Image (cartoon, rainbow, N blue to C red):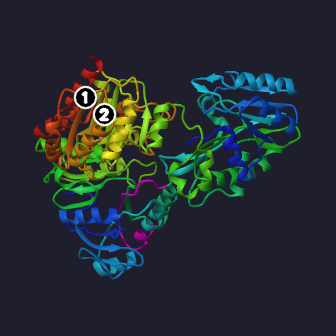
Amino acid sequence: MDLFEYQGKQYFARFGIAVSPGDVADTVDEAVAVAERIGYPVVVKAQVKVGGRGKAGGVKLAANVDEVRTHAGNILGLDIKGHVVRRLWIERSSDIAKEYYASFTLDRPNKTHLGMLSAQGGVEIEVVAEENPDAIAFLSIDPVRGLDLATARRWVNEAELDEAAREQTAELLVKLYDCYTTGDCDLAEINPLILTPDNKVHALDAKVTLDDNASFRHPEWEEFRVNETEDPREIMAKEKGLNYIGLDGTVGIIANGAGLAMSTLDVVNQVGGTAANFLDIGGGANADVMAAALEVISADPKVKAIFVNIFGGITRVDEVAKGVIEALSRVSISSPIVLRLDGTNAVEGRAILAPHLNAALITEPTMLDAARRVVALANA
Amino acid sequence: MSIFVDENTKVIVQGLTGGQGRFHGLRNRDYGTKIVAGVTPGKGGSDVDGVPVFNSVVEAVAATGATASFISVPPKFASAAILEAAAGAITFIVCITEGIPAHDEAVTFNRLVEEFPGVRLLGPNCPGIISPGKCNIGITSGDIALAGGPVGIVSRSGTLTYQALHELTQQGVGQTTCVGIGGDPVPGTNFVDCLAAFEADPETKAVMMIGEIGGSEEERAAEWIKHNMTKPVVSYIAGVTAPAGRKMGHAGAIISGSKGTAQAKMDALAGAGVYVCLNPTEAGQKMVEIVKAL
């Protein structure tokens, strides 16, 4: 789960990481109230999960109440790369002497954690990595040993941060690592991490991705689960507990297993079609799941045909077949359905479907045959 | 021969008394796997359909001489179960548990490397391993596999593993061993581990490798193949059409920026002399051709 900047800052604050004083606002009046409370000048910042909001006019400095009204009014509702701004973060403006970069993430090839620290912050780290890789001090951290203050001190020296920033940054990095590990982040990034003219170090931005697998030990994450998606199909799928990702094509996809679902998208594409979604129904292909899946997919007006691709393992194909028939008796589906059923109890499953087959409910013997058929129907 | 397991491998099931553990553990036993014990703290002395249950791995190993463990416990207990198995003298651990936090996996993997260097972990979040006719640990349906070789399979995805087995079995081409390494960010066993084992196995004549988007394990495999592999490798990478920034089901299957794309992986593999196919059926057909020409 990606956090909004304001959520990331609230999360950082729990781990003792210094952030600018501020608060959220969903209306112009709320923005004014926050600004009056924290004191001018303030920065009005669009809360969207996409980069480049500054260039898009989503970050503005306001010196007084009139400017807050103007900027808040302009930014709320602004469309930034397809993300509509519904919430603002209003914070006290900071004077900046220097901008740094700091982050922790998993180094998958080495199965360790990777810290990145740079005296060149405020720009995209990918650009720094490309143009001036020596400006980034990389630190490989053994997950068993973690990061101690002595190591963090050596690290800030190596990164050649300004003398005045080093001790504060070392302490902040230990806290950020704590946030990253005990806070179960996939990514904890501060860009920029600033040094103020009066020699204070604090986080001016926050980019945090939480590991959904760790939700069971973080009940406090519940409050972060707001406005996760704008896509009405994904909202509906989420309500029904489905592993669904909306795409732009015309062939609705239902498959069991993430790999097979991805592969189904690929094969549909190869034979000239476009997928409307990714949907992995996992091992639970019973009537309820199938009905929910068919309902979500057929609610998508772009869908012209549906491909149900099942390879039974734990999932029994006869159960899938029963699920499809029962689902069709519950929900009305306007698009034709092409099924490919293999694996455990496939023969029984096909026999169950046989009497129900018609022009709108078709089976094909292989994944490729089914893909060709469903694409022909979708493109007809 | 098979890799990692064989007909003599004695297996305990950690979590045998749970719903999943019981179902798959007994299914593995029915396939012919030597499932010799279960482990559930507090349930020692009981049995599951005749399989004795012990309170700890140490007790189970002492009583049975088991060297492998099949772990099917909830995510919050999985790391402790893996480390208990390693400390209890188990040398091959298969963990099918899905949903373990990445930080737990990172710590557990590094503790295994540092404290138990002789132990191999397969998974987590994997379908397991099957050596047809000999041993099946995990959730793969035994009847889609065909004994006798000569193909080794290694895959990051569950259902695509079944699809690969199915494509070969239908054409009468058998498998030496099929290993599902799982779709999590910190897999205990990776492609290179399996490729090296297949390269060293005299009965394996060719390898089918099924990858997917995310990470760089396929690229590392390509590098290894280029310099070390003498046997033909056929590959299929799922997720050519996957959008960036969205997790496609598996925690590890995500394209970050330009990293982890299917195309980059396919290019790397093609550059290493691997037969890169565009779908599982094509990969199956290519493998059948290769095996016929052996």
Q: Which residues are magenta?
A: B83-100
* Residue B201 badge: none
User: How far across and how far down the image is residue A201, in percent?
Assistant: 80, 43
The residue carrying mark 2 is A264
Q: Position of residue A211 (x, y in %)?
A: 54, 48
The quadrant where residue A358 appears: top left
**Residue sitting nearer the eye, A328 or A244:** A328
Identify which residue, B284 or A152, lies in the foreground.
B284
Image quadrant in which you'd find residue A51: top right
* Quadrant of the rendering where the N terminus of chain A is positioned: top right
Amino acid type at circle 2 is Thr
Q: Is residue A380 above or below residue A207?
A: above
Under tag 1, what secondary structure?
A: helix
Say above or below: A282 vs A33: below
Left or right: residue A153 versus residue A365 is right
User: Is residue A257 depicted above or below B289 in this figure?
Assistant: below
Which residue is at a point 23% across and 35% down the rendered structure image? Answer: A339
Of the numbered discs 1 and 2, the one sitting upstream in the chain is 2
Image quadrant where one finds the C terminus of chain A: top left
Callout 1 environment at 10 Å: few (<14), some (14 to 19), or many (20+)? many
* Coordinates of residue A43 in the picture (x, y in percent): 79, 31
Q: Residues within 10 Å of mark 2 (few under 14, many from 20)?
A: many
Do the CB atoms of the residues marked 1 and 2 lie less than 8 Å apart? yes
- Tell me the residue at 43%/72% (across/down): B87
Which numbered tag is attached to residue A371?
1
Q: Amino acid at mark 1?
A: Ala
Residue B176 part of the magenta segment: no
The answer for how far apart the CA atoms under marks 1 and 2 are is 8 Å
Q: Secondary structure at mark 2?
A: helix
Residue B148 appearing in the image:
yes
The image quarter in which residue A375 lies = top left
